[in-house]
Image (spheres, rainbow, N blue to C red):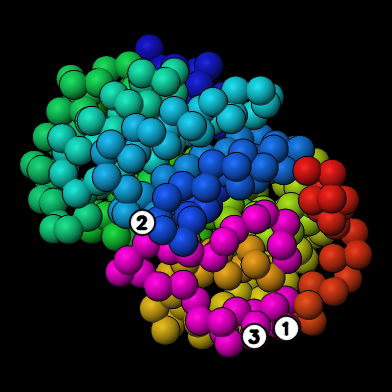
């Protein structure tokens, strides 16, 4: 039977909380706690960790287990839903991470396919069947990104929903193809389809339930307003906001992404532009932080693009109170 309780919990504005490292590569737990408190106060509908913005690829299993214990502890006081990414390079590594999550009371997990080599059709079927058998109480949000090397369109999601109706409850749709979004969301409306920041408004117009967001970590009140517009079906206002965000990303962020600063690395530079969340700016080898001259350029561009929106943001007050 479809797990409607957990599926109904997947909606609205979710933050991809970044991983704050110390200079020697350890988790800065105090900063993580303060950032969780700030995100919950927006309010976010949910907070998740250890996808790309959480640098999952740099966290071995023992550290992952320690982090999940810390993350769930600091999330417990908040009326805010929780999910955890469990992607790894092989199936057993994913199973091991799911078991850690279940041990800490988290059943909703983000799963991307093992990403080093492409999987064939039989590999895909075997992958999901193995997860269903090994950790049947887990609930899956498929992380649909090209780095998974497997194209998941409407046909593939109909199959997954049919074969594993108890486990498969949601998606994180990385595609920016409007026709594909229409087909996926329209053909599996029982699934909680969540959009990324670039397609929030058109995706929610099609029936998507919300967004897994990095931008909420930079302009939280703005993003809360965007989701409120969508919830109330104020589509012209929402599309105006969506368009401005996409133009900003195209003009100011894509040139830096083109230099190889991706995912959580560029996410930290975006966050530094506003200072809503704390972050020491460290990343784990071999991935280096965005260079300081480029960070300063982002800050300058940010102040120009978002000057008006910043006058309505309340996070400066939140920071002084934390």
Element class at badge 3: helix
Quarter-of-image position of residue 136: top left
Residue that numbered label 2 is attached to: 145
**Residue drawn at the location 38% of the way across and 46% of the way down:** 143
Q: Which residue is mark 1?
A: 300
The span shown in magenta is: 274-302
Q: Would you say residue 97 is visible in this rendering?
A: yes
- Provide residue 138's location: percent of width, then percent of height: 34, 22
Report how far apart the C-alphas of labels 3 and 1 lie in the structure: 5 Å
Of mark 2 and mark 1, the one earlier in the sequence is: 2
Please state if 148 lies on the left or on the right of 214 as rendered.
left
288 inside magenta stretch:
yes
Q: Residue 268 location, x and y as percent? A: 55, 64
Q: Is 106 inside the magenta-drawn segment?
A: no
Q: Is 255 in front, or is 96?
A: 96
Which residue is the site of mark 3? Answer: 297
Q: Earlier in the sequence, mark 3 or mark 2?
A: 2
């Amino acid at each position: 039977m479809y797990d409607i309780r957990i599926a109904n919990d997947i909606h609205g504005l979710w933050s991809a909380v970044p991983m704050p490292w110390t200079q020697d590569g350890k988790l800065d737990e105090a900063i993580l706690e303060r950032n969780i408190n700030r995100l919950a106060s927006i309010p976010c509908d949910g907070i998740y960790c250890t996808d790309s913005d959480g640098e999952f690829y740099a966290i071995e299993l023992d550290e992952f287990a320690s982090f999940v214990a810390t993350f769930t502890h600091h999330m417990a006081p908040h009326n805010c839903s929780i999910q955890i990414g469990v992607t790894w390079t092989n199936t057993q590594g994913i199973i091991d991470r799911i078991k850690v999550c279940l041990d800490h009371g988290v059943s909703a997990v983000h799963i991307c396919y093992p990403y080093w080599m492409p999987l064939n059709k039989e590999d895909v079927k075997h992958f999901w069947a193995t997860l269903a058998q090994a950790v049947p109480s887990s609930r899956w949000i498929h992380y649909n990104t090209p780095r998974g090397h497997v194209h998941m369109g409407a046909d593939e999601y109909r199959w997954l929903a049919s074969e594993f109706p108890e486990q498969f409850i949601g998606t994180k749709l990385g595609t920016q193809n409007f026709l594909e979004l229409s087909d996926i969301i329209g053909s599996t409306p029982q699934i909680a389809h969540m959009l990324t920041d670039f397609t929030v408004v058109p995706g929610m117009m099609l029936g998507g339930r919300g967004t897994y967001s990095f931008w909420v970590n930079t302009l939280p009140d703005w993003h809360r307003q965007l989701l409120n517009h969508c919830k109330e079906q104020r589509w012209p206002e929402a599309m105006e906001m969506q368009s401005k965000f996409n133009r900003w990303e195209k003009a100011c962020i894509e040139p830096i992404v083109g230099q190889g600063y991706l995912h959580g690395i560029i996410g930290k530079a975006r966050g530094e532009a506003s200072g809503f969340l704390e972050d020491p700016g460290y990343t784990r080898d071999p991935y280096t932080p965005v260079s300081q001259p480029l960070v300063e350029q982002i800050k300058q561009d940010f102040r120009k693009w978002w000057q008006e929106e910043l006058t309505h943001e309340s996070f400066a007050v939140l920071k002084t109170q934390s």
